[in-house]
Image (tube, helix red, strand yellow):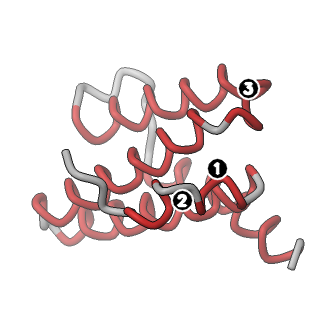
Amino acid sequence: MTAQHRELAAGRWLQFSLVEQMANTGSEVERALSWKERGNADYCTRAVERALELLDLTIADAANRGRLRELTRVREVLVDYFFADNQYSSSAARWRTYFGAFAFAARAGR
């Protein structure tokens, strides 16, 4: 898979706080949820792939070492929701609540 966020992958992502990183990841998750609800599987998959790329960049950020357990679990559950059997019983509402908190915090921090 080629990098969709080339500029961010080149190092700009590391300039963001964890809250900003998760808020941006949440934006891609929101797009994926929206496309899923509209029944467009191709666009949904593309948005999830972009979200996973951002999440992988967040996981790779040395500043987030103390949050690796949460970040890797988020990745696991996200993949399960969109690509597997949803064994964790995730829902669009739960994803919106989880990532919405980061979006709110990122806006409040500006």
Q: Residue at x 71, y 60 (%)?
A: 16
Q: Are marks 2 and 3 in contact (CB under 8 Å)?
A: no
Q: Report the amino acid beneath label 2.
A: Gly
Tell me the element at label 2.
Answer: helix
Q: Residue at x 41, y 53 (%)?
A: 51
Nearest the eye: 91 or 80:
80
Give neighbour class at mark 2: few <14, some 14-19, many 20+ (Cα, 10 Å): many
Residue assigned mark 1: 98
Cα separation, mark 2 vs mark 1, equals 8 Å
Quadrant in the picture for the C terminus: bottom right
Mark sitting earlier along the chain (1/3): 3
Q: Report the amino acid beneath label 1.
A: Tyr
Quadrant in the picture for the N terminus: top left
Q: Residue at x 34, y 56 (%)?
A: 50
Comparing labels 2 and 1, the label whose residue is closer to the camera: 2
Residue 87 vs 98, above or below: the answer is above
**Number of numbered discs overlaid on the protein picture:** 3
Residue assigned mark 2: 26
Mark sitting earlier along the chain (2/1): 2
Tell me the element at label 1.
Answer: helix
Q: Are marks 2 and 1 in contact (CB under 8 Å)?
A: yes
Q: Report the amino acid beneath label 3.
A: Arg
Give the left or right position of residue 94, taking residue 20 as reference: left
Nearest the eye: 100 or 4:
4
Q: Position of residue 28 (x, y in %)?
A: 42, 63
Q: Residue at x 38, y 62 (%)?
A: 6
Give neighbour class at mark 3: few <14, some 14-19, many 20+ (Cα, 10 Å): few
Cα separation, mark 1 vs mark 3, equals 20 Å
Comparing labels 2 and 3, the label whose residue is closer to the camera: 3
Give the left or right position of residue 79, taking residue 69 as reference: left
Cα separation, mark 2 vs mark 3, equals 20 Å
Residue assigned mark 3: 65
